[in-house]
Amino acid sequence: MVYDKNNVFYKILQSEIPSRRIYEDDLVLVFHDINPVCKIHALVITKGLYMDFHDFVSKTSPEETRAFFRAVATVAELLEIDKSGYRIISNIGKDSRQEIQHFHVHILGGEQLG
Ligand code: AMP
């Protein structure tokens, strides 16, 4: 499989479709999920073009990996859920029901999660 630019997150990166941005740096973009499943639901995406976690891990650099996970922590602090706690999830492939084929992590929090 190869990365297909015809996906929503690529279009968000290109600013072809809007998003409610929370954080951005040279390597990472974070925005609110359009269909939140709890009080705080953010999506952390790489600016690099990877289909999923496995694709990311096999091709990324240490610098990009550090930036990605640093962004997760930074956003948790910005949204003030770093003390109360939160969950990070990445759906990978068909059985996980990954909907958008651009690597991302969900940040869920702001309330007690089920
Ligand atoms: P996944 O199943 O892990 O691929 O999750 C994709 C997530 O992207 C879902 O939680 C959707 O609600 C979210 N989503 C889809 N389109 C948009 C959009 N235009 N802006 C923000 N989030 C979106």
Image (spheres, grey):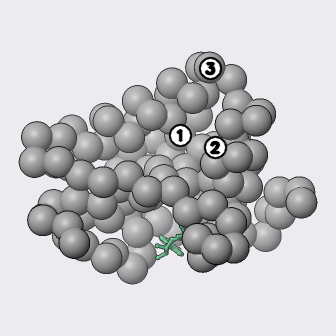
Identify the element where label 2 is drawn.
Answer: loop
Residue 76 in the figure: left or right of residue 7:
left
Residue 34 in the figure: left or right of residue 93:
left
Identify the element where label 1 is drawn.
Answer: strand
Dot 1 or dot 2: first in sequence order is 1
Residue 26 in the figure: left or right of residue 113:
right
> Mark 1: few, some, or many residues within 10 Å (few <14, many ≥20)?
many
Circle 3 sits on which residue? Answer: 62
Circle 1 sits on which residue? Answer: 28
Q: Where is residue 85 in the image (x, y as percent from the top left)?
A: 17, 48
Dot 2 or dot 3: first in sequence order is 2
Within the image, what quadrant is residue 102 found in?
Answer: bottom right
**Mark 1 to mark 2 CA distance (whole Å):** 5 Å
**Disc 1 C-beta below 8 A from ligand 1:** no
Q: Where is residue 52 in the image (x, y as percent from the top left)?
A: 67, 54
Label 1 sits on what residue type? Val
The residue drawn where x is 76% and y is 35% is: 58
Badges 1 and 3: C-beta atoms under 8 Å apart? no
Dot 1 or dot 3: first in sequence order is 1
